[in-house]
Image (spheres, rainbow, N blue to C red):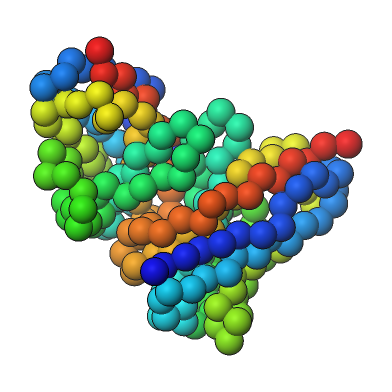
Amino acid sequence: QSALTQPASVSGSPGQSITISCTGTSSDVARYNLVSWYRQYPGKVPEVLIYEVTKRPSGVSNRFSGSKSGNTASLTISGLQAEDEGDYYCCSYEGRTGVFGGGTKLTVL
Amino acid sequence: QVQVVQSGGGVVQPGGSLRLSCSASGFIFSTYAMHWVRQAPGKGLEWVAVVWHDGSNKFYADSVRGRFTISRDNSKNTLYLQMNSLGAEDTAVYYCVRDEGTYKFDYWGQGTLVTVSS
C-alpha cells in the first residue's frame, strides 16, 4: 500500500491549462478504472471532482477532466481560475483497499 | 439531504483506545459502502478502512490493521471506528466517507480530530 505519486506542487496563470499526474503501479491505477480526484481547500472537507478515471459528478465544472495511461492517471484543469487554488489528491482502488496520492498544491499565479 | 455527522474524537494517551461514530441520514445507508479516511496535521489524505454495505467485508490499511476495527449498524444508520493501541502516528483528523460504489467518495463527514498525546 504505497501512496500514489503526485508532484508536490504545480502552478499556472489564469486562463491556462495545467495537468496533475498520479503515478501508481500495475496493482492499482493500471489494473482498475477506479481512480478519483479530490480538491481540498485549507481547513475544508475534500470534494470529489472526477471518479472512475474520467467521469465528472453533476455540478463539477467541465473545466476538470481526467484520463489514464498505463499506471499514470491525470487531472487536467483548463481555463485556470483563482478559485482553483488548493490541494488536489488522487485515489485508486487497489483490490480490497484504497490508496491516496501524496497531494499536489496548485497555485494560481 | 444527505448528511454524515461524526462524533467522538479527542485526546487520548499513547496505548489508549477511542471509538469514533458517524451518523448518516438522507440516503439509504444500508446500500452504501462506507470508509474512514484520515489526515495528519499538515499532511495528505490517508485511506484507513472500508466496510461493505451489508457489513460482510471489512478491509484495512496496513498501518492500522490489527488495531482498528470498522463496523456499522444499519438499523441505526451509524458507522463506527474502534481504535486501539493508539500511537502518536495516529494523530489526525478522521473523516467518515460515503462510497457510491466505485471509490467515488461523494459525501464526507465534517471530520473529527484525534490527538494521541501524554
Residue at 41% across, 67% down: B2
Horizontal and vertical percent for residue A89? 37, 39
The residue shown at (46%, 31%) is A42
Q: Residue A90 versus residue A45: which sits nearer the camera?
A: A45
Where is residue A96 shown, x and y percent of the image? 44, 64
| Direction front: furthest residue | B1
Nearer to the camera, B93 or A104: B93
- Is residue A29 visible in the rendered image? The answer is no
Q: Which quarter of the figure has residue A32?
A: bottom left
Q: Is residue A14 above or below residue B20?
A: above
* Quarter assignment of residue A25: top left
Q: Is residue A86 left or right of residue A16?
A: right
Q: Across the whole image, how many numbered discs are drawn on residues?
A: 0
Q: Quadrant of the N terminus of chain B?
A: bottom left
Furthest-top residue in this view: A109
Q: Residue at x 41, y 45 (%)?
A: A46
Q: Position of residue A11 (x, y in %)?
A: 26, 17
Residue B105 in the figure: left or right of residue B22: left
Residue shown at 25% from the left, 13% from the top: A109
Q: Is residue B58 left or right of residue A99?
A: right
Question: Does the image show residue A89?
Answer: yes
Viewport quadrant of the C terminus of chain B: top right
Reply above or below: B74 against A109: below
Q: Against A24, is B7 above or below? A: below
Snapshot quadrant of residue B74: bottom right
Query: Residue B41: image x %, image y %?
Result: 61, 32
